[in-house]
Image (cartoon, grey):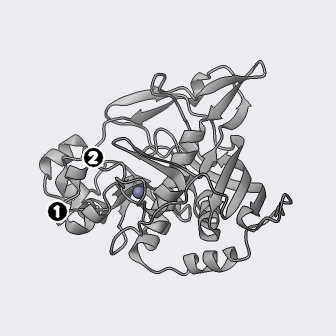
């Protein structure tokens, strides 16, 4: 069976990020509120600390130990989607990797009074310049932590093709865009370097709250979309994404929001639904036909994944095929078992 590289790239939108001055934090403008969310793993998953890789994070709450997902991990996951949809800056990409004028337009925001759509919502930090984000995800609390069981052990390939494989990572010397990992039906067994990890099984549930303030109707709508996505799509989270781990879905189980810019005296009119403008914003989003949105949907899709097998090219393949591109690999130059 043909083997496909476990990740692909979502191209940057044309033009440049829509940078503007952000809303100052000392004002009440637009929507404030919170989303209650439930996250459900649809594949084995593991969110671990850098110190204890391989074991799911656990922490004490009211005397009992629970598995949990830090708010910062959740924030990273939804910010990633928001950046794709709204053309946010490439804040984590080194400037030296941005080659063309188009790519350099997407370099990380540097001034806290002139920010891309994603930095205006999630915040920025660059060389002493700071803008605190308007979205604050709390930790997600999972099931009571049990003993680590050996039978959930999965081997994961930790060797990765590195950025120096230019033919693979770049297209005609340009950056290929943002990286995204495909969903996989069966986690892949590592074949080269492996690491023993102990993921939580599919069907593990975590719950928590995301609070926000000063969001425009578009921002609150796209924040909501960045959580729940749409029919047939799912998120990737945590360790072992290339090996097929970390496919998760998110539901907003309840919400509470109010337009604080429109409040009268001290009475706040809390809503339990998105603003009236949201429906049109979501419909327009789902009608997009640009390459960015199309690539996003194809990589985040959980439909038809049963027919596909994923794997990295081996180090030997990279050595034997130094100039071969990601497309050529995916197009089946690798139909043998030794991919
Ligand atoms: Zn930015």
Which residue carries the number 1 mark? 173
* Rendered residue at 42%/35% (across/down): 156
Vertical placement of residue 266 versus 151, above or below: below
* Rendered residue at 25%/43% (across/down): 162
Res 254 → quadrant: bottom right
Which quadrant is home to the N terminus? bottom left
Secondary structure beneath dot 2 equals loop
Are discs 1 and 2 less than 8 Å apart at CB?
Answer: no
Q: x, y percentage for residue 28?
A: 67, 58
* Rendered residue at 68%/77% (across/down): 277
Of the residues tagged 1 and 2, which is closer to the observer?
1
Q: Is residue 324 visible?
A: yes
- Out of 280 and 296, give the one closest to the viewer: 280
Vertical placement of residue 31 versus 41, above or below: below
Q: Is residue 184 visible?
A: no
Q: x, y percentage for residue 42?
A: 63, 49
Which residue carries the number 2 mark? 338
Circle 2 Cα neighbour tier, 10 Å, few/some/many (<14 / 14–19 / ≥20): few
* Rendered residue at 48%/38% (across/down): 239
Q: Count the marks: how many?
A: 2
In-image side of 52 versus 220 (left or right): left
């Amino acid at each position: 069976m043909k083997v496909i590289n476990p990740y692909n790239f979502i191209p940057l939108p044309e033009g440049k990020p829509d940078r503007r001055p952000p809303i100052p934090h000392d004002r009440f403008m637009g929507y404030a509120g919170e989303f209650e969310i439930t996250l459900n793993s649809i594949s084995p998953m593991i969110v671990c600390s850098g110190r204890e890789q391989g074991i799911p994070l656990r922490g004490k709450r009211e005397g009992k130990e629970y598995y949990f997902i830090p708010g910062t991990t959740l924030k990273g996951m939804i910010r990633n989607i928001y950046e794709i949809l709204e053309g946010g800056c490439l804040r984590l990409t080194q400037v030296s990797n941005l080659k063309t004028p188009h790519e350099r337009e997407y370099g990380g925001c540097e001034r806290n009074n002139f920010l891309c759509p994603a930095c205006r919502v999630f915040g920025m930090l660059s060389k002493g310049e700071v803008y605190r984000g308007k979205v604050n995800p709390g930790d997600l609390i999972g099931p009571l932590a049990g003993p680590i069981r050996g039978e959930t052990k999965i081997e994961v390939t930790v060797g990765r093709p590195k950025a120096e494989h230019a033919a693979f990572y770049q297209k005609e010397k340009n950056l290929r865009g943002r990286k995204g990992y495909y969903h996989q039906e069966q986690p892949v067994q590592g074949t080269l370097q492996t690491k023993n990890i102990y993921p939580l099984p599919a069907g593990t549930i975590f719950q928590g709250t995301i609070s926000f303030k000063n969001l425009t109707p578009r921002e609150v709508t796209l924040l909501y979309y960045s959580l729940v996505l749409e029919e047939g799509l799912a998120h990737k989270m945590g360790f072992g994404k290339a090996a097929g781990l970390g496919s998760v879905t998110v539901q907003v189980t309840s919400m509470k929001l109010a337009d604080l810019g429109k409040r009268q005296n001290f009475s706040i009119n809390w809503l339990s639904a998105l603003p009236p403008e949201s429906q049109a914003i979501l419909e327009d989003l789902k009608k997009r036909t640009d390459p960015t949105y199309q690539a996003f949907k194809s990589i985040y899709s959980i439909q038809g994944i049963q027919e596909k097998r994923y794997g990295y090219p081996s180090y030997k393949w990279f050595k034997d095929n130094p100039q071969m591109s990601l497309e050529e690999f995916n197009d089946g130059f690798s139909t043998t078992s030794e991919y």
